[in-house]
Image (cartoon, grey):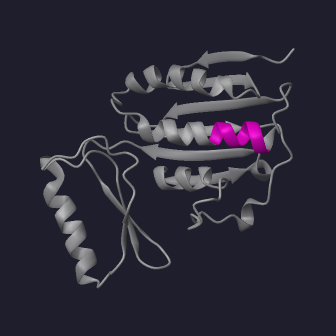
Amino acid sequence: MKPVFKIDKANRSMTISFSSELRHVDQALKNIKPFLKDFGVEDPSSANIVVRELLINAIEHGNHNEIERVVKCQVVSLTDERFKITVTDEGEGFDHEHLTFDLTDDPSRERNRGLYLVNSMADEIQFEDGGCRVVAYVTFTSGTVFNVETLKNGKQITPSGNLTADCADDFRQTLLSLHKENVRVIQFDFLQVEEVDS
């Protein structure tokens, strides 16, 4: 019989296998958090988003919510700051060759936001086994980093953490560089920002 929820730990890796039920996603994240903390990751929010979205995709789109199918999530510490996250489902795969990570401007559209989030949080994403296996790499940095992405009509700035005095100069320089490039539309993604000071 296939596992309902099973955890295997090794020296620098953790593998969680479970039946395709959404209730297991939070349970998986609760177990991954202390694993990351063992390597000094105090704020695992970016990894949590990557894992959550990949697990939901695997359950809903890969395994089509069929409880007898298993989802497997492996987190490997490559270094104390860089992690490899692999999520595997038992589905038929999908056409990942023509996949785009563009976020729709239509606020009423409910789907296709998950992989956009994964792409914005991860350093790199790879699709294997026809799309049944997704590998994402996440690196944690000690300070806030300002990731700049090009949109159709401007730029998007995504801070990796809080907007406080210690990163104010970096934030200012990022804005000034876009001003010098004559960028007129700047969109901000504050998903990872919990605090903003004066």
Side of 59 where 80 appears, left or right: left
Side of 3 where 125 appears, left or right: left
Q: Is residue 85 visible?
A: no
> Hey, which residue is sitting farthest bottom in the picture?
182
User: On screen, 90 above or below 3?
Assistant: below
Residue 58 part of the magenta-drawn span: yes
Residue under the point 38% across and 27% down:
39
Tell me where residue 70 appears, x and y as whole percent: 79, 28
What is the span of residues highlighted in magenta in the rendered image? 54-61
Q: Quadrant of residue 112?
A: bottom right
Residue under the point 12% across and 50% down:
198
Which quarter of the image is occupied by the N terminus? top right
Q: Main secondary structure of the magenta part?
A: helix
The residue nearer to you, when weighing 155 against 106, is: 106
Residue under the point 67% across and 53% down:
111
The residue nearer to you, when weighing 43 against 137, is: 43
